[in-house]
């Protein structure tokens, strides 16, 4: 399933070379880097149908014009024949963790260079599946984001949240039971230094938010309730007081950005909304009343099917149980603890998705991929999992124009302020896919990305083109 084979890389570099050859740059007219995609059916990210027979002219990184009768403006405009297929905006992932390519517990044991290499590989795979932007909602992905933007490595646009912020014993507190607290005689481990800041009380929370912002966070991620992948915080726990959450919101708002919280339960989400939190991540156990409150407050719901999580967790437990070819009592204990957490959370998914849909609350398209390279690959099945609750068109809107609204909450912290994302319109970023089949009617064509996604463009640069 590795998409970036040698052949792809050759294609990528051939495309880059065709756009950025030194001879082209020397010529005034050629320096505009125009690409004309013609003969495509354009779906703009918001409409209910695509429009056939269209052309899209890209200049540099932005869409310059769209119309039925566009022709190349310069002698060097590169022309791509879309063969009548559908042109859609690049997919936006609302919830991923590129800096967590292994499980949180494994972070401590692994070499940082190795972890960074895995993250680079993961990012490349994400882009080559047609996902041109990710909201990286926790974990130090800021260096990766920079390397991608500088063209050093290949990957999607990354809206990083830098460090998670968690209370002692919260979802981000991944210490073992023999690790002393970093503020009570212990020294900070790798997770507590770079991945998750443990902060208690409004003053410490403010400091942690400012620290994450200093490292380049475009938004702030706070753990407001129990989580699955952490050992010592039951799902029902409410983490942080309203006063602590309000401290986080105030510190984020001083930087003109927002706070998103990890939370599954009514109590955790109500605290967050009261404190001014703008985005609820997960929310699987919410009642209709709390969902109505989310809507009334104008907050965003960023949830996931967790179809991949159920599979990955099951596989991991199997591996743990089979270690050394004999029963492992500790693995069984962990298995039963964690399986109950997964079961508690995923049992709410149907109710969450159906109630949100009924109330007209858009659900951001995200996967919560982390833990292994395989997890990022498997994230493409989020399209199919969502068909249980949404139409293909609704899912496509979630994954493009709606997610772009969520990203826009970053205000002046938006790393990509030169045009809108998630739409095909004049002035928008040229993040585009040409897709075989009709994703508006069957969004799962995007799961077989190797065959069906025939062109991948990000920032006006072609990363894949099998149409030639
Ligand atoms: Zn997550």
Image (spheres, rainbow, N blue to C red):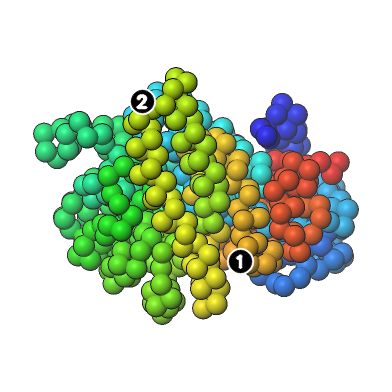
Residue position marked by numbered label 1 in the rendering: 389
Judge from the rendering whether residue 255 lies leftward or rightward of residue 4; answer left or right: left
Would you call the spot at circle 2 few (<14 residues within 10 Å), some (14-19), or many (20 or more)? few
Q: Position of residue 451 (x, y in %)?
A: 78, 43
Judge from the rendering whether residue 432 lies leftward or rightward of residue 165; answer left or right: right
- Furthest residue toward top: 324
Check the image and report above or below for 278 versus 467: below
Q: Where is residue 144 in the image (x, y as percent from the top left)?
A: 48, 38
Disc 1 versus disc 2: distance between alpha carbons?
40 Å
The reply to whether the residue tagged 1 has its Cβ within 8 angstroms of ligand 1 is no
Would you call the spot at circle 1 few (<14 residues within 10 Å), some (14-19), or many (20 or more)? some
| Residue visible at 58% across and 47% down in the picture | 379
* Quadrant the C terminus occupies: top right
Q: Which mark is residue 418?
A: none
| Residue visible at 73% across and 46% down in the picture | 448
Q: Does label 1 or label 2 sit earlier along the sequence?
A: 2
| Residue visible at 82% across and 62% down in the picture | 41
Judge from the rendering whether residue 417 lies leftward or rightward of residue 43; answer left or right: left
Q: Quadrant of residue 238?
A: bottom left
Q: What element carries label 1?
A: loop
Q: Position of residue 79 (x, y in %)?
A: 84, 49
* Quadrant the N terminus occupies: top right
Tell me the mark number nearer the camera, choosing from 1 and 2. 1
| Residue visible at 16% across and 34% down in the picture | 180
Of residues 340 and 15, which is closer to you in this image?
340
Judge from the rendering whether residue 107 lies leftward or rightward of residue 3; answer left or right: left
Q: Residue 109 carries which label?
A: 2
Question: Can residue 399 be seen by looking at this rendering?
Answer: yes
């Amino acid at each position: 399933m590795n998409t970036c084979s040698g052949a792809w890389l050759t294609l990528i570099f051939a495309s880059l070379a065709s756009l950025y050859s030194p001879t082209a740059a020397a010529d005034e007219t050629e320096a505009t880097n125009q690409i004309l995609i013609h003969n495509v059916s354009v779906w703009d990210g918001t409409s209910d149908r695509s429009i056939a027979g269209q052309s899209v002219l890209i200049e540099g990184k932005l869409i310059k014009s769209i119309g039925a009768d566009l022709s190349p403006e310069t002698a060097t405009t590169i022309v791509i024949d879309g063969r009548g297929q559908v042109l859609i905006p690049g997919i936006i992932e609302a919830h991923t963790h590129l800096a967590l390519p292994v499980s949180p517990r494994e972070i401590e044991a692994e070499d940082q260079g190795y972890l960074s290499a895995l993250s680079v590989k993961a990012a490349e795979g994400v882009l080559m599946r047609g996902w041109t932007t990710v909201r990286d909602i926790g974990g130090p992905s800021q260096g990766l984001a920079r390397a991608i933007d500088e063209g050093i490595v290949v990957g999607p646009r990354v809206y990083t949240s830098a460090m998670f912020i968690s209370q002692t014993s919260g979802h981000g507190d991944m210490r073992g039971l023999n690790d002393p607290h970093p503020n009570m005689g212990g020294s900070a481990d790798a997770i507590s230094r770079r991945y998750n800041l443990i902060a208690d009380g409004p003053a410490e929370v403010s400091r942690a938010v400012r620290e994450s912002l200093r490292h380049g966070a475009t938004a702030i991620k706070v753990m407001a309730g129990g989580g699955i992948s952490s050992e010592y915080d039951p799902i029902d726990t409410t983490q942080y007081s309203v006063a602590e959450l309000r401290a986080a919101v105030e510190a984020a708002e001083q930087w003109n950005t927002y706070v998103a919280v990890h939370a599954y339960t009514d109590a955790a989400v109500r605290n967050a909304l009261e404190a001014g939190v703008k985005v609820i991540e997960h929310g699987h156990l919410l009642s209709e009343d709390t969902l109505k409150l989310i809507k009334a407050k104008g907050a965003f719901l960023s949830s996931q099917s967790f179809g991949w999580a159920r599979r990955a967790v099951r596989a991991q437990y199997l591996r743990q149980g089979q270690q050394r070819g004999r029963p492992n009592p500790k693995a069984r204990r962990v298995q039963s603890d964690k399986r109950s957490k997964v079961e508690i959370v995923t049992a709410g998914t149907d109710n969450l998705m159906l109630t949100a849909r009924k109330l007209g609350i858009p659900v951001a398209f995200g996967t919560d991929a982390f833990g292994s390279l395989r997890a990022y690959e498997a994230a493409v099945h989020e399209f199919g999992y969502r068909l249980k609750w949404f139409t293909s068109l609704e899912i496509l809107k979630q994954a493009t124009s709606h997610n772009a609204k969520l990203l826009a909450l970053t205000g002046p912290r938006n790393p990509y302020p030169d045009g809108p994302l998630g739409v095909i319109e004049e002035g928008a970023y040229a993040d585009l896919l040409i897709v075989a089949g009709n994703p508006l009617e069957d969004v799962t064509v995007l799961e077989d990305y190797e065959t069906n996604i025939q062109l991948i463009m990000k920032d006006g640069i072609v990363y894949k083109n099998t149409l030639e």
